[in-house]
Image (spheres, rainbow, N blue to C red):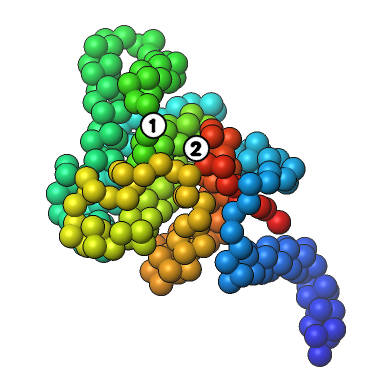
């Protein structure tokens, strides 16, 4: 019976079948990784490094004509997520009380100040925005997960387009809230954002939360509308970035 269906697919759409089969194997590998609860490893395999280095070469992740987008999107994206999920994943109603927003808002404030100073200058280039980003980075020495996650967003901002950055930004905020919920439910439900786990701890153990993030936080909420395959790719990219930047000694092993 299976052979019969394969022949039919081969006759009508061989390429579709090959693509479907590859995607099925990929999803199956991810599923097995999750259900077995495989822990991150300190080993870095060649496949991990290649995927990390080529991550933004995919067309949907590429910059558009090497143009940087407005830094104001950092604040805009956070407020969009907060207003949409404040009762579900933030558990408080005042975004200004959240420490990570205070960090994010400084980026937009620097951008607004520079735009005001240069409002009559028609030669404002991408290098201006990149310099503004570097200025904000120089003022922050990452010491906790919130600050490290923000540094990650600043880094990927330089390499991708606004649409994909929105996807990555959403992932980071959801992952951050998941970590806080899993690690300290009482503080998360209070809530007291200044005492969040991500405010009090470094990123050494972040890779350990990846499995629970997908199975216990994302899956019951239908992945918050995010594509699961792309989500797994971003999780892998973040973990490898954390390892490369020496924020953790663990790294997810890629199949």
Q: Residue 76 at x, y = what percent?
A: 28, 40
The vertical placement of 4 against 215, above or below, is below
Residue lying at the far left in this picture: please name it. 94
Q: Residue at x 41, y 72 (%)?
A: 220
Residue at 47%, 31% in the rendered image: 155
Q: Residues within 10 Å of mark 1 (few under 14, many from 20)?
A: some
Above or below, 11 against 248 in this view is below
Residue 115 in the image, given as x and y percentages of width and height: 27, 18
Q: Is residue 27 visible?
A: no
Q: In what element is the residue under mark 2?
A: loop
Location of residue 110 with respect to 33 vertically, above or below: above
Q: Are marks 1 and 2 in contact (CB under 8 Å)?
A: yes
> Residue 52 lies in what quarter of the image?
top right
Residue at image x 68%, y 44%? 44
Q: What's the distance in space between the residues labelled 1 and 2, CA to CA?
A: 9 Å
The quadrant in which the C terminus is found is: bottom right
Number of marks present in the image shown: 2
Left or right: 14 as drawn, with respect to 176: right
On residue 129, which mark appears?
A: none
Residue 218, image x, y percentages: 43, 64
Q: Which residue is mark 1?
A: 142
Q: Report helix, strand or loop for mark 1.
A: loop
Q: Position of residue 153 (x, y in %)?
A: 43, 37
Q: Which residue is mark 2?
A: 247
Question: Along the polypeptide, which appears first: circle 1 or circle 2?
Answer: 1
Q: Nearer the viewer, residue 220 or 10?
A: 220
Q: Most extreme residue toward the bottom, as rendered?
A: 1
């Amino acid at each position: 019976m299976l052979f019969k269906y394969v022949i039919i697919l081969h006759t009508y759409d061989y390429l579709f079948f090959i693509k479907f089969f590859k995607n099925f194997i990929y999803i199956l590998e991810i599923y097995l990784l999750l259900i077995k609860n495989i822990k991150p490893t300190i080993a870095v395999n060649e496949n991990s490094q290649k995927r990390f280095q080529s991550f933004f070469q995919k067309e949907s992740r590429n910059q558009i004509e090497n143009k940087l987008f407005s830094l104001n999107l950092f604040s805009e994206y956070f407020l969009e997520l907060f207003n949409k999920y404040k009762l579900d994943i933030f558990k408080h109603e005042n975004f200004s009380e959240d420490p990570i927003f205070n960090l994010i808002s400084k980026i937009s404030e620097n951008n607004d100040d520079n735009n005001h100073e240069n409002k009559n200058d028609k030669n404002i280039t991408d290098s201006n925005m990149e310099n503004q980003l570097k200025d904000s980075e120089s003022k922050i020495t990452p010491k906790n997960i919130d600050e490290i996650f923000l540094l990650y967003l600043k880094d990927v901002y330089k390499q991708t387009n606004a649409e994909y950055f929105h996807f990555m930004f959403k992932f980071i905020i959801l992952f951050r809230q998941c970590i806080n919920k899993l690690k300290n439910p009482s503080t998360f439900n209070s809530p007291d954002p200044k005492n969040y786990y991500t405010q009090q701890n470094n990123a050494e153990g972040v890779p350990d939360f990846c499995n629970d993030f997908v199975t216990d936080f994302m899956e019951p909420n239908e992945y918050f509308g995010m594509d699961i395959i792309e989500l797994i790719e971003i999780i892998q990219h973040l973990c490898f970035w954390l390892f490369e930047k020496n924020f953790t000694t663990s790294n997810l092993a890629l199949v």
